Image (tube, helix red, strand yellow):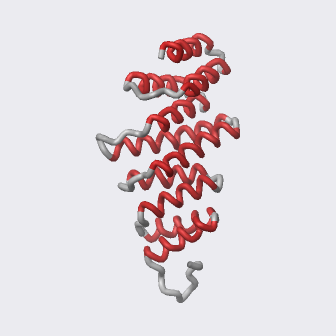
Amino acid sequence: MSKPRAGDAQPGAAEYDAAVLEAVGAGDWLCVVELLAEVKLLKFRLPDTTVMAASRALCEGGQWGRGAGLLEDAILAGASCDDATLRSVIGACDAAATAVGDASTATRAAKAATGILDAVASTDDEAEAPGWARNAVARLLARAGDYDGAEAALDALMREEVAVEGRTFTVIAAELLRAGEGDRAEVVLECRDYL
């Protein structure tokens, strides 16, 4: 679908759905962003599969913040999130926080990932984010300098008997050490050794 011109009939939701999928297929994340802005303005609702594909495409295009925001909004609006999309978006947040190495990016990535997991939890009393995603958020919180949040996330994983990945302990302990919190890092590593 090309951009509508003056005098053209306004495309409907089905045309926008096709256009978003075409842009996703072409890897044109900028077009995806523009089309999604129009969809929002026109108050159209796209199929969940299209929204998930758009969210993944944005993350793959380096627009992890937009992809995460789109996913969170979609989940809160009642969309069902598939595992591939959740992995793509949380993974993109994790990669951004790790690659850039700047606290501001890590903080934004941690907030984005936490927002997604909160959205998953808020949509259904039975819904719970997968353990791997909760591990990733704990690591993101540590990289963002939110050591209390990281330790709380780690505590929740252990208390709820969710499998804690070895690297989650390692990342949290390393970030605590980097911040001069050796005693706290030691406690985290003792927990790892205990489990």
Q: Determine the image quadrant of residue 166.
A: top right
Residue at image x 65%, y 20%? Answer: 179
On the rendered structure, is 170 left or right of 83? right
On the rendered structure, is 5 left or right of 119? right
On the rendered structure, is 88 left or right of 177? left
Q: Using the image, determine if residue 171 lies above or below residue 111.
A: above
Query: Looking at the picture, how far across and down is residue 105, in whole percent?
Result: 64, 40
Residue at image x 47%, y 17%? Answer: 195
Residue at image x 52%, y 87%? Answer: 8
In this orientation, which residue lies closer to the viewer: 148 or 99?
A: 99
Q: Using the image, determine if residue 8 lies above or below residue 157.
A: below
Q: How many marks?
A: 0
Query: Looking at the picture, how far across and down is residue 16, in whole percent?
Result: 49, 73
Q: Residue furthest bottom?
A: 7
Q: Using the image, determine if residue 148 lies above or below residue 126.
A: above
Query: Looking at the picture, how far across and down is residue 56, in whole percent?
Result: 55, 55
In this orientation, which residue lies closer to the viewer: 141 or 87?
A: 87
Residue at image x 58%, y 58%? Answer: 57
In this orientation, which residue lies closer to the viewer: 151 or 145?
A: 151
Query: Looking at the picture, how far across and down is residue 132, in whole percent?
Result: 49, 36
**Which image quadrant: the N terminus?**
bottom right
